[in-house]
Amino acid sequence: MGAIDLNTLRSAVTLLSLLVFLGIVVWAYARRNRERFEDLGALPLMDEPATPEGARHE
């Protein structure tokens, strides 16, 4: 058994990267994550919570 050819190693890393990317895409668009991601996406648009009377707001 000889050493792994550099092009074979590059091909393996490229294939692994593609599989990881596709896994992330499938996870991100899965129906079970939709509601949570929509809630998190709306978070920056929500109003700040009201502060109690007399409390300092910094």
Image (cartoon, rainbow, N blue to C red):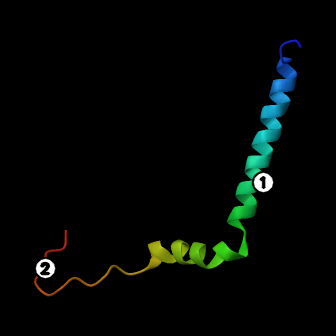
Q: Label for residue 33?
A: none
> Which residue ends up furthest to the left in the rendered image?
54
The residue at the point 78 percent across, 40 percent down is 16
> Which residue ends up furthest to the front in the rendered image?
1
Locate the N terminus and report the quarter of the image it occupies: top right
Q: Quadrant of residue 37?
A: bottom right
- 26 in relation to 6, above or below: below
10 Å crowding of disc 1: few (<14), some (14-19), many (20+):
few
Q: What residue type is labelled 1?
A: Leu
42 sits to left or right of 11 = left
7 sits to left or right of 16 = right
- Residue 53: x and y in percent read 14, 87
Q: Which element is circle 1 on?
A: helix
Q: Between disc 2 and disc 1, whose residue precedes?
A: 1
- Residue 30: x and y in percent read 72, 70
- Residue 39: x and y in percent read 54, 78
Q: In this figure, which residue is indicated by the disc labeled 1?
A: 22
6 sits to left or right of 52 = right
The residue at the point 46 percent across, 77 percent down is 45
Q: In this figure, which residue is indicated by the disc labeled 2?
A: 55
